[in-house]
Amino acid sequence: MEQIVGTPLRMKQLTKQQSESVYNDAERQDLPSPSQGSDHSAAHNLGLKTSVVVDEMIWYPLYVKNGHVHVLEAPVRELSKETAQLIELLVAQVRPDIGIPVEVQGDEEREVQRLSAWIVDQLEQERGDSEIPDDLELKRRLTGEMIPFLLTCESVHAADVNRAQLKKLLKSYFDGEVVLVPLRNHEWLILAKKELVIGAGEDKDEDNAESETDMLAAFCLGLYELIAIEWVGTFHLSVGSSFSPVKWLPSMVALLRETIFLGRTFHVAEHVHFPWELLLERLLYSIPVDQRRLFLEQAGDHGVLFSDNETLSTLETFFQLDCNVSETAKRLYIHRNTLLYRLDKIKQETGLDVRSFGDAVLVKLTMLLYKVTKRK
């Protein structure tokens, strides 16, 4: 933006006293007149003015966090009227793209922000088993078993997603009320009653745990597809098993964050991640880096092999389909003999036959360790 307007700009966090000056309900005589034809709806939605002049500086409000307004600051004397209006217009365009939760007036929004701040504080202090304090009103809505989801966005193209829009979409998909808590930039915690996701009244038989994960996986995949269709961008979604959020909420958030991190690290092409499918990855990532490198040296340096996209895709699909040659060939849309040729080539280069259980395990471990060790 500095290159466009030719004026030095900087981000600034206002004090709470200064922040009061940029709300629409605070009357100031030194406000510049609005630009003709400008779209100020984003600022109005935040309850903020489009710009404020203070001590020969002009502030363009961006977002609110922890009671403080963050602004883009520019020197008034170096701005022509046209340049000031241009900055105002540009800020109005990018303001919705800033993913920091905005403090909105209203009891529910304030309680959501309080719960968010409490979760962040507990995570920073590594208190995963802390119970939600009684003075947080949302605690009353978090009783019984609930299903947690964590949604993150890593693409600026999806930054127009705000809490109100997302909650409306979730209410439609879940067919009921959910608790939506913004945690940090482009990260949302979703809590839904168990019966909204997998129904109620299932018998607690031996197959119940497996059936619950299957239903969670299907529900999560459907939710991801809906979000991906609604907003253009790169999203990642994880889900946890049913739990009691009153006591284990910070711990669950930590688990879901780790799940997304491991999923993005080991399975870069996937966007929906399940903690029960990443147990091996979690174990391998916990191994110290020097031990990982030692293992790779002893197992053999197959970096050239794993850096080949075709070979890597073949191995990942082969392992995903339980080393079934016929099913792998179908999934890859290749002839069975072509797949056998690729597997024989891997055997020639590594001395390991992935059709043998022991060798398959070794190649799988080596491939996963290579992803987090050799690529760094």
Image (cartoon, rainbow, N blue to C red):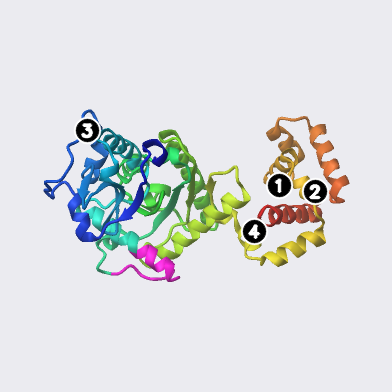
Q: Is residue 222 magenta?
A: no
Residue 136, position in %: x, y?
26, 64
Q: At 70% across and 40% down in the image, what residue appears?
A: 313
Mark 1 crowd level (few <14, some 14–19, many ≥20, 10 Å Cα): some
Instruction: Identify the mark at residue 46; answer none if there is no mark.
Output: none
The residue to which callout 2 is attached is 354
Check contact, mark 3 vs mark 2: CB within 8 A.
no
Specify whether 167 is left or right of 289.
Answer: left
At label 4, the amino acid type is: Leu
Of tags 3 and 4, the one toward the viewer is 3
Count of number-bearing discs = 4
Of pointers 3 and 4, the one earlier in the residue sequence: 3
Instruction: Identify the mark at residue 319; answer none if there is no mark.
Output: 1
The residue to which callout 3 is attached is 35
Q: How far apart are labels 3 and 1 at the CA level?
A: 60 Å
SS at mark 3 in the image = loop
Quadrant location of the C terminus? bottom right
Q: Which residues are magenta?
A: 118-133
- The answer to whether any part of residue 48 appears in the image is no
Check contact, mark 1 vs mark 2: CB within 8 A.
yes
For residue 231, which quarter of the picture? top left
Of residues 222 and 119, which is closer to you in this image? 119
Of pointers 3 and 1, the one earlier in the residue sequence: 3
Of residues 71 and 352, which is closer to you in this image? 71
Q: How far apart are labels 1 and 2 at the CA level?
A: 9 Å
